[in-house]
Image (cartoon, rainbow, N blue to C red):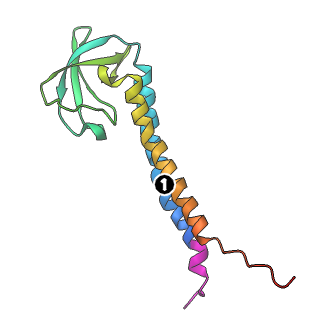
């Protein structure tokens, strides 16, 4: 059974929109809270910690540090820039008072780190808008010249 030649042409823009918007929403859902966490930890005092390796850009690395005499292991947020650190390295972290699980590397709480983290979804959005604009301009039908005057 055929639905006709024009059916897919009408559905395709909706499929493309969903295929572009879903990753963008996911990117914003990951990057904005991670940037917000870093901004909230700027005023916290740096604390010495031990780094545990992993895929830090994906949020799979951790640190162990002391809080009131107890050892706490906390995961670092998504997008942590831990270049050059390996398991067992001494690092400095900022932890939220009263919430030992909310930590970020002290070097990763500056304005530049937050701006770089927010640049990822904003850049992806601009790229998607540019691609959409190119698509619209390419598909626009040329104007017909005026006939006989």
Classify 84 as above or below 130: above
* Identity of the residue drawn at 61% across and 74% down: 10
Residue 67: x and y in percent read 27, 12
Residue most extreme to the right: 149
Residue receiving disc 1: 22
Magenta-tinted stretch: 1-11
* Identity of the residue drawn at 43% across and 31% down: 115
Between 133 and 58, the one lying in front of the other is 133
Q: Is residue 80 left or right of residue 117?
A: left
Residue 6: x and y in percent read 61, 82
Classify 55 as above or below 86: below
In which quadrant will I find the C terminus?
Answer: bottom right
Residue most extreme to the bottom: 1
* Identity of the residue drawn at 23% across and 40% down: 55
**Which quadrant of the figure has residue 89?**
top left
Residue 121: x and y in percent read 46, 43
> Is disc 1 surrounded by few (<14), some (14 to 19) or many (20+) residues within 10 Å?
few
């Amino acid at each position: 059974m055929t639905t006709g030649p024009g059916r897919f042409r009408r559905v395709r823009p909706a499929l493309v929109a969903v295929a572009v918007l879903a990753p963008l929403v996911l990117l914003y859902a990951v990057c904005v809270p991670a940037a917000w966490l870093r901004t909230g930890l700027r005023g916290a005092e740096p604390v010495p910690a031990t780094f545990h390796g992993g895929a830090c850009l994906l949020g799979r690395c951790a640190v162990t540090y002391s809080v009131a005499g107890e050892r706490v292991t906390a995961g670092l947020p998504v997008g942590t820039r831990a270049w050059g650190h390996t398991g067992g390295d001494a690092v400095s972290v900022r932890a939220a008072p009263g919430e030992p699980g909310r930590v970020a590397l002290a070097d990763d709480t500056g304005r530049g780190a937050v701006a770089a983290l927010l640049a990822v979804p904003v850049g992806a959005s601009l790229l998607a808008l540019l691609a959409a604009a190119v698509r619209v301009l390419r598909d626009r039908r040329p104007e017909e010249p005026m006939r006989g005057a």
